[in-house]
Amino acid sequence: MQCPKCNSSMHEVEVETLQGKVVIDKCERCEGLWFDNGEAEQLKSDWMADFLDSGDPEIGKTYNAVRDIQCPRCGDVMQKINDAKQSHIEYEACAAHGVFMDAGEFTDYKHETLLDYFRGLIASLRRRT
């Protein structure tokens, strides 16, 4: 599979959870993560999943500016989506296949804090202007 952001190769990473094994794809260059439908939500509650998102969040922010990316599974253009609970997090989603998170986004997605409420408020204000 090719990375939808930088077109580099992605490799599979296996994670053992209490619910079973989850296999995600990680870009070898930008270190973005591809999650098939339901995998990000499943790994969000797994305390061991932090090691997956080892990429530099600053580099991830630069790739977040890339628009009109295609789903690595079906080739359809993916939608930019803001997370419902943490609206400052913006990732790409294919309704049929999964989501792509840039480096640093999964770690942010995984750890909800009071600061996230304020980040979401600021993000919504910026989108209005």
Image (tube, helix red, strand yellow):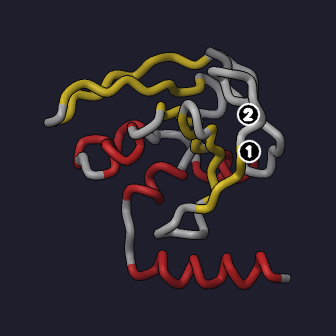
In-front residue for pair 100/73:
73
Label 1 close to label 2 by CB (< 8 Å): yes
**In this picture, is 45 found above or below 70?**
below
| Amino acid of disc 1 | Tyr
Residue at the spot 72% in from the left edge and 84% down from the top edge:
125
Q: Secondary structure at mark 1?
A: helix
| Amino acid of disc 2 | Lys
Looking at the image, residue 80 sits to the left or right of residue 111; the answer is: right
Looking at the image, residue 91 sits to the left or right of residue 53; the answer is: right
- Residue 84: x percent and y percent? 51, 66
Residue at the spot 32% in from the left edge and 27% down from the top edge:
22
Residue, disc 2: 5
Residue, disc 1: 63
C-alpha separation, residue under disc 1 versus residue under disc 2: 7 Å
**In this picture, is 10 found above or below 103?**
above
Q: Crowding at label 1, few (<14), some or many (≥20) Cα neighbours within 10 Å?
A: some
- Residue 89: x percent and y percent? 58, 61
**In this picture, is 82 found above or below 123?**
above
Looking at the image, residue 116 sits to the left or right of residue 67; the answer is: left
Residue at the spot 65% in from the left edge and 33% down from the top edge:
30
In the rendered image, the quadrant that contains the C terminus is bottom right
In-front residue for pair 77/21:
77
Determine the image quadrant of residue 1. top right
Q: Residue furthest front?
A: 96
Q: Secondary structure at mark 2?
A: loop
Q: Crowding at label 2, few (<14), some or many (≥20) Cα neighbours within 10 Å?
A: many
Determine the image quadrant of residue 111. bottom left
- Residue 75: x percent and y percent? 74, 23
The numbered mark, 1 or 2, whose residue comes first in the sequence reads 2
- Residue 61: x percent and y percent? 69, 53
